[in-house]
Structures are given as C-alpha cells and as structure tokens.
C-alpha cells in the first residue's frame, strides 16, 4: 500500500507553519489551495548542477534550494547575496554594513566564526571556485545582474566538493536569449546609496551572450563606511555541433574604496550604535580589492550515454588593507605590521566523465572526476605609520610566499534500483599541501619557512523512497573535512616565529533525514532534520592587539530541523518561507580567553556551551502579489535569534525581527519594452538591532549594528 495525500494534509502542514509565523492561517490556506486547483501553474523546469547529475532536484537525497534571480521584478538593487536568500532555510546571510569585510555567511552553523570573507562553505560562480584551496572564500564578485539562479546545497552531500564544504553556494549566469534583451537599472536610497547597472543578452549565430556591468557607491550607515564597487561579468556559450559546447566566463571586480568602521563594544552600542570606533579614524582603516578571472568549460556528448566535461580557470586577486594595529605593538620585531598587501594568483582544472546505463533493468548514472587547484600568494606586511603619521604604509615587516595545492579525485553513482527507491553513493579523496617560504629574515626575525600536508577520504551515501508521485523521503550520511586556512595558520600561540603547523584539520560526520512534498504543481514543502558531529574544531587560543591564534578544542555538535514552503498560491500570489531551528554546542570542555586582550587561555568552557555566532532560531518569509505588468506588492519578514559572540559565551547579541515592504508598477511602453518603477522600505519599524557579530574580536568590539529604517527607489527599463 502506498501513501496518498489530499488537501487536508497540505492544510495540516500549512497550519504548523502558521504557528511558526511562516504561513497564513488554515482558513486562508484552504482558500489558497482551492485557488491553486482552479488556476494551477506548473513551476518551470529548473536545471540544477549542484550534484553533477541529470536528475530532478526532488529526487536528490539532499537539502537543495534553487532560487531564481529575477532583478526585473524585485525592487532591491542587487548588491548583496542576502537579498536573494529570503525564504531559504538553513543558510544565514548577514549584511555587515561593511564592504571591507564581505557578507557574513553560514549554513547550519558552519562558517559562523569567520571574521571576514567566508569560511567553511564552498562558493562557485558558473562552476568556477570562489573559494581558494585553503578554504577561504568571498562573494564580493558575485554579479546578480547576469544571474539566472542560485543553488544552495546543505548537509552530507556538500562534502562532495571537498575541503571546507559545510555547505555549497553556486551562482549561475543566465544564457543568452533568442530575442535580444537589455536591462538598464538605476537605484538610489538611504545613506547616499546609488547603483547603476546594465545587462544585455542575446544570440549571434551559434553564440549566446550575457554581458553585465554595474557601479555601486554608498556612504554607509555608520561614519567611515564609504564604498565604491565596480562589477563586470561576461558569459558566452558556443554551440560547436555534434554534441559539443564551449562556455567562456570572464569576471572583474574593482573596489578601490571600502572603508572599515570596525565593530563596537557593548558600551559603545548602547551609547550610540551609529558611532565609529576611534582606531578606525586614527588609522584610516580601509581595503582595496582588484580581481580578474577567466574560465572555460568544454562539454561533449558521446552517443547520448557518455558525457565529458572539462573546466579550467585562472585569476588574480589583489588586496591592500590598512588595519588598526597599535603602533606600539608593531615595535615588536616579530610583528608583521598593520598593513596587509596580498597578491594572489589562483587557478585550477576539473574534468569529469558521466556515463548513463542500466543495471538489473534499472537506470543509473556514474560520475568519475578529478579536480586540481592552486593558489600562489605573495603576502607582505608593513607598518601602518611613518613617524607620527598613522594610516600610511611604512616599513616592510613581512614578506613571504604562501602556496597551497590540492588534487582531489571523486566518484558518484546514482541508481534507481526499484520503482520507488533510488541510491546515491559518492566518495572523494582530498590532498591539500601548504607551503610557505619566508623572504623576510633578520637577526631578530628568524626564517619561518615550512609546510604541512593534509589528506582525507570522505564517503557519502543517500537513499530516496518515493511513496507517491508528490512525495520523496530520504536519508543521507557523509564525512567532512576542513583544513585550517592560511589566516588561521598565520600565527603561533606560543609567540614564536613560524606558522601554526601543529593545527589539525576538523573532521565531521553528517546525518540528514528529509521529506520533499509537492503540495500542488506550483507549491512545494521541504523538511529536514540534521546532525553534524565534528572533532578537532578550531577555536581561539590567544587574542590581542588585533591578532588571533587558534587551537583544536575537541568535539562539537550542530543539529536541528529546517522547513520551507515555496511556490505559487494562486491569484498572482507567490510565497517563499523558510525556518531553521539549530542547536550548536561544544561537546568537549576546553580553556578559552577570560577577557580581551587575551595572551593565554584560562577560562574553563564547559561541555554544552553554545558555539558563538549561531542563532538557535532564524527564518524569513517573502510574499508577493502581482504579475509582469501593472502593480506589484511584496512583504518581507526576517527573524534571527540571539547569538553569543565569544567562545566563553560571556556576551551576546539580542535577536531581532525586521519588516520590509515594497510596491511597484510596471508599464509596457512598446511591444518589447517595459518600464518598472519601485519603492522599498526596509526595517519598517525602525528597530535598533545588531546585524552581525565579529566572533572573538581581540578588542571586544564584537558588534556591528544594522541600519534603522531605510528607503530605496528603483527604475528598470527592459527593451
């Protein structure tokens, strides 16, 4: 006997979500389900690349969310990743209001300790890694004007992407359209925010193209937060015939100015959340970024059952950052200074073969592949003063080459072995080599050269059961692996020269149980329960004068549940809602910093203490009404629970709830031309809140306040 589900089951689920504040009450839901039957809309087919398999997302034994990026119908400017992730469970993107440090991104608690950039999560743009081999990544070059979709993979199968894969986020650019399409956008709003963008798509014979460029400038919510960012993206698809295709991608980021206001202490936040930390002004803390990269993907089909895919990429990223390290601290002969000049050349290859066949009368897919990535970093440090003048580049204090290489073979096998059952197996072997060559050797600063190798084999398995056409139940298991990054290896806790090559990689065991339920042709409900047990988790060992060192602290556990409801409700209503309950705890006791600054750990942290930066509950909802023409309105609700800000859990940031509203009107000016005007207000209630936190900040400046009520006016002309 197979399970059968009716509308009353759908109403029961919607009633549960209503109790969580993520759906309308049952009475309203009953009307929406009825409307959905009267005006059913089949969701468009979505191409998904996250699992490297040609199967529907619903048939994957993994939590996977696919978000369509639709700048033509959304009134937000398209600057931050967080704009597109409303209604997606599991992932938390917190806008720091600080473009010198990038968005704070975590998935099921992985990545929450990152004080800048993105850690513990693998990032990709058009299949090209935005995460370096050492595990450090950034989303600053994500171009949303050219984007088609964002894929967010969570849980055990994330480890198919190797080192530091607590989750995977992939941005995919749209293909060129048969009818040429150009979009011009202008947005202006609070805090001197302004953005201009252009995107043009089309086809020229066998070549489809998508070209996008944008300029974003803002003064910032807090003083000393000014930013200027230029972003360009080009994608070309070339049909070569006989099942062959070549895709070329070029990306440029030019961010000449990004001031850093630093975090605030609790006392400073209470006194005035808009103030800037004094050292930020004294040392003119700021960052400059320049990045250029190229990538090519070649695909060829052999007889319909075999496919070859080869990808190659190369890029350069240049960073110049002025920090607020006190000048007196830099008198230490071992100090690397307060100015970081980091030039990174990176690149890699990925090749995989896919074979489709039949076993015992049932279809299967086999994937065999190997990836190789490398980074070559020239890292220099300078004093951030000359004489009595602060915030300028001074004498050289550090000069070294930091190189990382990884080579990672992997395999996947998907088998639909029975009418209602399928199996997905995978394995990956990672070898990551760190090498540093010290070029700054003096009588008081000895040679710090050295190296360390890490390796791990990470298997994973998933099982899917289909009790009916509209329901999938699954279970999956996998092992994860995360090396320290060069930033965590950079300083030894004993104060001696050299890198912290004694740090061990964190290893995790991940389990997930889930359900995917298609309530109607246009409305889907997903649920998952998950657990990740990690050993040798990294935590701070010393923290003073802007420098942190790390230690392995034993076992941790991240476990919880997540729910999502997304699709169309009928009558031009669309809904996206996601909720996550997450418990992240240290399961082993260890010693942590008693206060900051901290030269040695002395405070016992008991097993069961919450991990910093991880809220126990968070969720978001976006409900929108309107079609392609005429009026549209939308409502966003976002809620994030309280978080602790240090390993000792001695301080915390309160939770918050925010409301955003938008209204717009789209008019057809000609047969293929339309104009969209929008007005948007965020934080409608003008709430004071902490938008993000700097975990274990060495100066106790943990808190980054979010802005009060803000407005944005937008215009898009599509022709």
Image: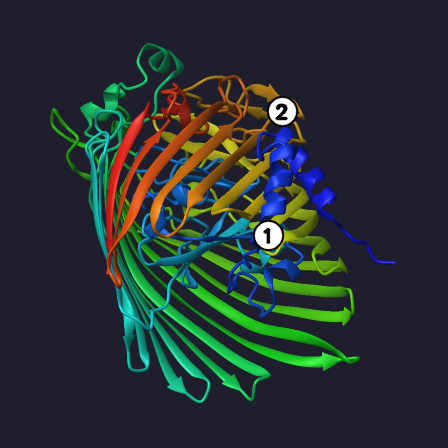
Q: Is residue 704 above or below residue 84?
A: above
In-front residue for pair 699/50? 50
- Side of 188 relative to 541 (left or right): left
- Side of 206 relative to 429 (left or right): left
**Residue 635 seen in this snapshot:** yes
* Residue 494: x %, y % from top left: 46, 32
Q: Is residue 177 above or below residue 552?
A: below
The N terminus sits in image quarter: bottom right
Query: Label 2's element?
Result: loop
Earlier in the chain: of badge 1 and badge 2, it is: 1
Mark number, residue 289? none
The C terminus sits in image quarter: bottom left
* Residue 251: x %, y % from top left: 28, 60
Residue farthest along the front direction in this orientation: 38
Question: Which residue does the image show at 71% across and 46% down from the upper left?
Answer: 7
* Residue 293: x %, y % from top left: 29, 62
Question: Which residue does the image show at 51% across and 84% down from the upper left?
Answer: 301
Question: Which residue does the image show at 72% across and 54% down from the upper left?
Answer: 474
> Mark 2 sits on what residue?
609
Mark 1 burial class by Cα count in 10 Å: few <14, some 14-19, many 20+: few
Closest to the camera, between mark 1 and mark 2, is 1
Query: Label 1's element?
Result: helix
* Residue 91: x %, y % from top left: 52, 42
Q: Is residue 509 above or below residue 354?
A: above
**Residue 164 seen in this snapshot:** no
In-front residue for pair 470/399? 470
Mark 2 burial class by Cα count in 10 Å: few <14, some 14-19, many 20+: some
- Side of 522 relative to 205 (left or right): right
Residue farthest along the right direction in this orientation: 1
Mark number, residue 38? 1
Q: Quadrant of residue 287?
A: top left
């Amino acid at each position: 006997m197979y399970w059968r589900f009716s509308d009353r089951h759908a109403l029961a689920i919607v009633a549960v979500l209503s109790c969580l504040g993520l759906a309308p009450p049952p009475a309203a839901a009953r009307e929406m389900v009825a409307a959905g039957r009267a005006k059913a809309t089949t969701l468009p087919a979505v191409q998904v690349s996250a699992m490297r398999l040609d199967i529907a997302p619903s048939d994957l034994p993994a939590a996977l969310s696919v978000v369509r990026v639709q700048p033509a119908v959304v009134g937000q400017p398209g600057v931050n990743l967080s704009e597109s992730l409303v209604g997606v469970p599991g992932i938390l993107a917190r806008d720091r209001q600080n473009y010198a440090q990038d968005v704070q991104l975590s998935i099921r608690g992985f990545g929450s300790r990152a004080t800048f950039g993105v850690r513990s999560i693998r990032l990709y743009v058009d299949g090209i890694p935005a995460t370096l081999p050492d595990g450090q990544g950034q989303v600053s070059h994500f171009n949303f004007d050219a984007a088609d979709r964002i894929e967010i993979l969570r849980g055990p199968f994330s480890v198919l992407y190797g080192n530091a894969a607590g989750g995977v986020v992939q941005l995919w650019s749209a293909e060129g359209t048969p009818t040429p399409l150009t979009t011009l956008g202008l947005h202006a709003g609070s805090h001197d925010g302004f953005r201009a963008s252009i995107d043009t798509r089309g086809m020229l014979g066998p070549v489809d193209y998508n070209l996008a460029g944008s300029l974003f400038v803002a003064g910032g919510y807090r003083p000393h937060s000014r930013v200027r960012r230029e972003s360009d993206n080009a994608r070309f698809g070339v049909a070569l015939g006989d099942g062959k295709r070549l895709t070329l991608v070029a990306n440029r980021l030019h961010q000449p100015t990004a001031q850093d206001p630093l975090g605030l202490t609790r006392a400073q936040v209470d006194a005035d959340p808009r103030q800037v930390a004094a050292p930020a002004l004294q040392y003119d803390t700021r960052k400059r970024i320049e990045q250029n990269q190229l990538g090519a993907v070649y695909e060829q089909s052999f007889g319909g059952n075999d496919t070859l895919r080869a990808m190659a990429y190369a890029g350069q990223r240049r960073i110049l950052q002025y920090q607020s390290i006190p000048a007196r601290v830099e008198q230490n002969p071992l100090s690397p200074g307060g100015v970081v000049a980091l030039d990174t050349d990176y690149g890699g290859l990925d090749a995989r073969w896919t074979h489709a066949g039949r076993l015992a009368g049932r279809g299967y897919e086999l994937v065999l592949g190997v990836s190789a990535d490398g980074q070559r970093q020239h890292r220099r440090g300078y004093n951030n003063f000359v004489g009595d003048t602060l915030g300028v580049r001074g004498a050289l204090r550090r000069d070294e080459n930091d190189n990382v290489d990884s080579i990672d073979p992997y395999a996947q096998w998907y088998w639909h072995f029975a009418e209602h059952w399928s199996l997905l197996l995978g394995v990956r072997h990672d070898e990551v080599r760190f090498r540093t060559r010290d070029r700054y050797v003096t009588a008081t600063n000895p040679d710090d050269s050295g190296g360390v190798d890490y390796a791990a084999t990470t298997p994973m398995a998933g099982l899917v059961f289909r009790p009916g056409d509209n329901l999938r139940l699954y279970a999956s298991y996998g092992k994860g692996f995360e090396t320290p990054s060069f930033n965590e290896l950079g300083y030894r806790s004993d104060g001696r020269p050299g890198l912290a090559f004694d740090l061990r990689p964190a290893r995790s065991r991940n389990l997930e149980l889930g359900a995917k339920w298609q309530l109607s042709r246009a409305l889907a409900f997903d649920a998952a329960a998950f657990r990740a047990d990690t050993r040798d988790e990294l935590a701070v060992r010393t923290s003073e004068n802007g420098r942190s060192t790390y230690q392995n602290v034993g076992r941790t556990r991240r476990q919880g549940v997540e729910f999502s409801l997304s699709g169309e409700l009928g009558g031009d209503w669309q809904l996206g809602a996601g909720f996550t309950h997450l418990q992240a705890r240290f399961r082993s006791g260890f010693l942590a910093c008693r206060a900051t600054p901290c030269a040695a750990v002395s405070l016992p942290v008991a097993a069961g203490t919450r991990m910093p930066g991880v809220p126990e509950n968070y969720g978001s909802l976006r409900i929108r009404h309107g079609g392609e023409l005429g009026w549209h309105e939308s409502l966003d609700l976002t809620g994030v629970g309280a978080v602790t800000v240090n390993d000792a859990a001695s301080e915390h940031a309160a939770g918050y709830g925010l409301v955003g509203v938008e209204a717009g009107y789209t008019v057809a000016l000609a047969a293929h031309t339309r104009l969209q005007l929008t007005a948007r207000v965020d934080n409608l209630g003008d709430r004071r809140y902490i938008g993000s936190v700097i975990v274990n900040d060495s100066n106790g400046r943990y808190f980054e306040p979010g802005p009060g009520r803000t407005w944005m006016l937008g215009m898009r002309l599509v022709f």
